[in-house]
Image (cartoon, coloured by chain):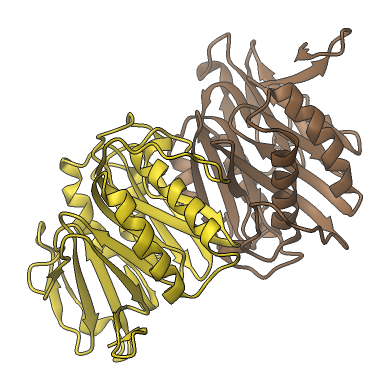
Chain colours: A yellow, B brown
């Protein structure tokens, strides 16, 4: 979730958690509040975890949220293998979650980032952080970061399925290999129903006309909103609840 | 808390949280589970935070726990200034909390660790991580780390009050400038009463004869156990629920 005003994700997370029947090997959710960060992780499924229960009912207002429900492919079920992963670079926290499976990815890690657990995902994240640190001396603009990520991400995606979310609290980057959808909620807001559960919210009652929220998810979370599928290999960046697009002059900007 | 068997801290945290009346500017608690880590932080006081409520009632079993209740001296009340702080070094998470105030501490940070918030504490932690990274090429033994920390910590303590806790999940280091106490719980276990609240636990009912737990706190948390005060400037290291002491041959070992 990426928003222009601090927003809670109790509705979306409730929808995501119902999908933890299959993706039952732990869950995690990271909330940026400015450059500050909260990360909740549990090795229990989001369907039964008391930590997930807290997240469903404690309205944490955040401008960037990344949540993940895990189905273990590489690495055992344990806390150190639970997404999202966090590192600090240039005095900012970076949060990363990955859905997919990378084969034969064994980069040389010569930088300051090393995996703690044993997943291909955390390894990919550490490599990404290392390469970002090499490419820029201090925190670059969202546009510059997007250009660098556009070169780095295909090198990861070449190893398999790489649906990923990345945020530093300023922007949210999303890359889809196989399945990824996004939705932009904006004025006029209306009601929405969760896809997997009989839960409904009327966003009109909870928002102001200037609020904008982008939600990115593997599969659409609601059944009555205009979700858009990522094309294979697409990297998109969201700022202030809106997709950035390339203008005629070649700059990344809000449409 | 440092223990030889995964132990919950609901009792101790309940005691600590009552002290959040004065130390009301946020709280945080980090639990190692092996090399994995959970970190709960909130900018609300531990007396009222729903996150603190979860920690008081969800029995998270951990071998190393660091908790902190904040009274802001430097840096505003916000999530990025909330202890404990976490960084990764050598493929291990490191957790740091500080009680005190450092004056005129402005080190050159030329390494891979930069503060996200604006506290003297996080700055001290980043410098400590940088210097550890310079001193060792990969994760050294607890004994080697203790030797390096014994050289680094006084350079921080020279700037003011530096009561601190540091853990990488293998050991817990504690340094006292002004106020710090520790307690070793071991067989035979008995009952204990919280210092600040009418709460009592009988550890005999919850432990086995081989369990060992060390608890380190600014002020004793219980009223009927043999807490020992740190001497000013003392750095102590705890492994498997026991203080390490220097043997006749000069090695650090359990007594």
Q: Look at the picture and state if B138 lies above or below A34.
A: above
In the depicted view, which residue is nearer to us: B119 or A165? Answer: A165
* Image side of residue A110 versus residue A72, left or right: right
| Number of marks present in the image shown | 0
Q: Where in the figure is residue B88, as x and y percent of width and height?
A: 57, 43
| Visible residue check, residue B78 | yes
Q: Is residue B255 above or below residue A5?
A: above
Question: Residue B214 occupies which quadrant of the picture?
Answer: top right
Q: Is residue B199 visible?
A: no
Residue B213 falls left or right of residue A130: right
Query: Where residue B75 sits: x, y (%)?
Result: 70, 68
In the image, A240 versus B220, the foreground residue is A240
Residue at 32% x, 86% y: name it.
Answer: A254
Among the 4 quarters of the image, the one containing residue B198: top right
Residue A115 appears left or right of B157: left
Tell me where residue A203 appears, x and y as whole percent: 22, 79
User: Which residue is drawn at the image coordinates 60% and 64% (left, top)?
Assistant: A137
Q: Toward which corner of the image does residue B221 lie, by quadrant?
A: top right
- Tell me what residue is drawn at x 65 percent, y 61 percent: B24
* On screen, residue B74 above or below A143: above
Quadrant of the frame with the C terminus of chain A? bottom left
Q: Position of residue B109 (x, y in %)?
A: 74, 57
The quarter of the picture where the N terminus of chain A appears is: bottom left
Q: Please determine whether, in this image, residue B215 is positioned above or below residue B68.
A: above
């Amino acid at each position: 979730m990426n928003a222009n005003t601090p927003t809670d994700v109790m509705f979306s997370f409730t929808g995501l958690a119902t999908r933890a029947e299959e993706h039952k090997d732990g869950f995690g959710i990271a909330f940026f509040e400015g450059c500050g960060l909260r990360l909740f992780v549990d090795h229990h499924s989001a369907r039964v975890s008391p930590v997930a229960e807290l997240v469903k009912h404690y309205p944490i207002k955040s401008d960037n949220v990344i949540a993940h429900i895990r189905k273990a492919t590489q690495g055992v079920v344990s806390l150190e293998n639970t997404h999202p992963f966090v590192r600090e670079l240039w005095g900012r926290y970076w949060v990363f979650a990955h859905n997919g499976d990378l084969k034969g990815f064994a980069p040389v890690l010569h930088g300051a980032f090393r995996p703690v657990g044993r997943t291909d995902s955390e390894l990919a994240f550490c490599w990404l952080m290392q390469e970002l640190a090499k490419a820029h001396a201090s925190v670059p603009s969202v546009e510059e970061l997007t250009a660098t990520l556009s070169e780095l991400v295909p090198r990861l995606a070449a190893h398999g399925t790489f649906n990923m979310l990345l945020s530093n609290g300023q922007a949210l980057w999303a890359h889809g290999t196989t399945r990824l959808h996004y939705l932009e909620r904006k004025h006029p807001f209306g009601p929405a129903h969760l896809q997997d559960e009989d839960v409904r919210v009327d966003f009109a009652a909870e928002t102001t006309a200037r609020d904008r929220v982008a939600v990115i998810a593997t599969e659409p979370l609601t059944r009555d909103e205009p979700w858009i599928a990522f094309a294979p290999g697409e990297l998109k960046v969201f700022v202030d609840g809106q997709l950035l697009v390339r203008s005629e002059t070649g700059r990344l900007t809000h449409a």
